[in-house]
Image (cartoon, rainbow, N blue to C red):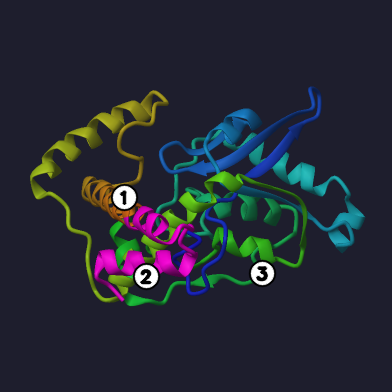
Amino acid sequence: MSRRNDFPGNFSHVALIYVEEEINEPYLIEAHIKRGVAIVTAEEYINDRKLRFMVLRIRNDLPEIKEDPLLPHNAAKFMFEETQKRHIPYDFKMTFFEPEAMFCSEVGSYAYKEYGIQLWQSESTISSYGVVTLLNTFGVENFVTQMPSDLEYDPQLAVVAEWRYIKALFEDHLYNVVIDAILVCAKNGEEIDHNEWLLSTVRLEKGYSYLMNLIGRTDPVPEGMSAMQAAKSEAFISRHEVLKEKVSTKAAEFLKMKNYTPPYWELVRMAEETTGCK
């Protein structure tokens, strides 16, 4: 989600950290597209490949924290227990004010709102017609919402730790320039083209997924996503992979010819050249 709003940011996901008192064990509570809101161990969370993550904490000088220093722990515990009490499906609509289903930002904002702290003091907007059309394809209905990338700039929070996988930085650049180029295509009115012949197969997979959801399994089609949306999602992922490979080839040719890795603006040019959208 970091590349889609009107002011693109650095982060596309948010998780809530809870440390169980009795065993001092950290857990992360997150909204997962396939599983809904789920609890994972720190090891599981880290092993789900990431390029960068940042740990944020509510500032100690806030009046609410001065009154109750354990408020952050209690908010995380509330969400930890809420996740165990009920199944919370993933919120593809991105309706942050309705807790029956939740996307990643909503997990954090819902937990803290219960304790009187409003994270995301202002919402982000997605106003590009092409991007709105593209996201609506995947089920998004609310385009004034809480974006993960904005939490970094919330003045109520302080950064306490950050981790980066520097060796993967170039791969991250490749991924982002292709996403940005596809979004430019979307702004120009281009829609996702999918294979109509595969739709019947996806419908069968959707039915199978429904049965799997009843017994706590997740694959292959996410709960809350229609067969059409799933087909277009697969088409989007496939197109991204093909385009990324082409940009990667151009980058290798650039390196061979000039003897240095292409800077970000060159990758942007290559991605736009590959998609034909500017």
Image disc number at residue 188: none
217 relative to 75 in the view: left or right: left
Query: Is residue 277 found inside the magenta-colored segment of the image?
Result: yes
Residue 24 x/y as whole percent:
79, 27
Which element type, helix, strand or loop, lies under badge 3?
loop
Residue 129 x/y as whole percent:
33, 76
Determine the image quadrant of residue 34: top left
Q: Which residue is mark 2?
A: 269
Residues packed near mark 2 inside 10 Å, few (<14), some (14 to 19) or many (20 plus): some
Residue at 61% across / 45% down in the picture?
Answer: 15
Residues packed near mark 3 inside 10 Å, few (<14), some (14 to 19) or many (20 plus): few
Q: Is residue 84 visible?
A: no
| Region of the chain picked out in magenta, as a range | 250-278
Residue at 59% across / 35% down in the picture?
Answer: 45
- Mark 2: amino acid: Arg
Q: Nearer the viewer, mark 1 or mark 3?
A: 1
Residue at 85% across / 59% down in the picture?
Answer: 64
Q: Quadrant of the C terminus?
A: bottom left
Magenta stretch, main secondary structure, is helix
**Which sits earlier in the primary sequence, circle 1 or circle 3?**
3
Which element type, helix, strand or loop, lies under badge 2?
helix
Residue at 81% across / 24% down in the picture?
Answer: 22
Q: Which residue is mark 3?
A: 121
- Mark 1: amino acid: Glu
178 relative to 70 in the view: left or right: left
- Mark 3: amino acid: Gln
Residue 221 x/y as whole percent:
30, 38
Quote the CA–CA distance across marks 3 and 2.
Answer: 36 Å
Quote the CA–CA distance across marks 1 and 3.
Answer: 39 Å
Q: Nearer the viewer, mark 3 or mark 2?
A: 2
Image disc number at residue 245: 1
